[in-house]
Amino acid sequence: MPKMKTKSGAKKRFKVTATGKVMAGPAGKRHRLISHNAKYIRSNRGTSALSEPDTRIVKKYMPYDR
């Protein structure tokens, strides 16, 4: 059986913690930030854990990060 491929978009956007949670940054912080005001950029710092249904989807995208 050949190896499964990781979705390249998912490996750039998500991180799996040691306990199995999937962490993600906020949407809209990748590029074209000059059109957003400074308050929006400041308030969307950091990462947060995804919900359980979203976690299941993302873990299918990254089969070897479990």
Image (cartoon, rainbow, N blue to C red):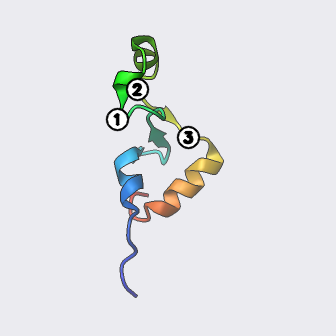
Q: Residue furthest top?
A: 39
Q: Which mark is residue 50?
A: 3
The C terminus appears in which quarter of the rendering?
A: bottom left
> At numbered mark 3, what does the secondary structure look like: helix, strand or loop?
loop
- Rendered residue at 58%/55% (across/down): 56
Q: Nearer the viewer, mark 2 or mark 1?
A: 1
Mark 2 sits on what residue? 46
- The amino acid pointed to by label 3 is Leu
Instruction: Give the Cα separation between the discs numbered 1 and 3.
Output: 22 Å
Mark 2 to mark 3 CA distance (whole Å): 13 Å
Q: Amino acid at mark 2?
A: Gly
Q: Look at 60% across and 49% down and name the residue there.
A: 54
**In the rendered structure, which amino acid carries the disc numbered 1?**
His
At x 37%, y 84%, the residue is: 2
Label annotation for residue 31:
1
Near-viewer residue (52 or 20):
52
Q: Which mark is residue 17?
A: none
Residue situated furthest right in the rendering: 53
Labels 2 and 1: the sequence-earlier one: 1
Residue sitting at the far bottom = 1
**SS category of the residue bearing label 2:** loop
**SS at mark 1?**
loop
State which tag comes first along the sequence, 1 or 3.
1
Q: Residues within 10 Å of mark 1 (few under 14, many from 20)?
A: few
**x then y, percent, for residue 11:** 36, 53
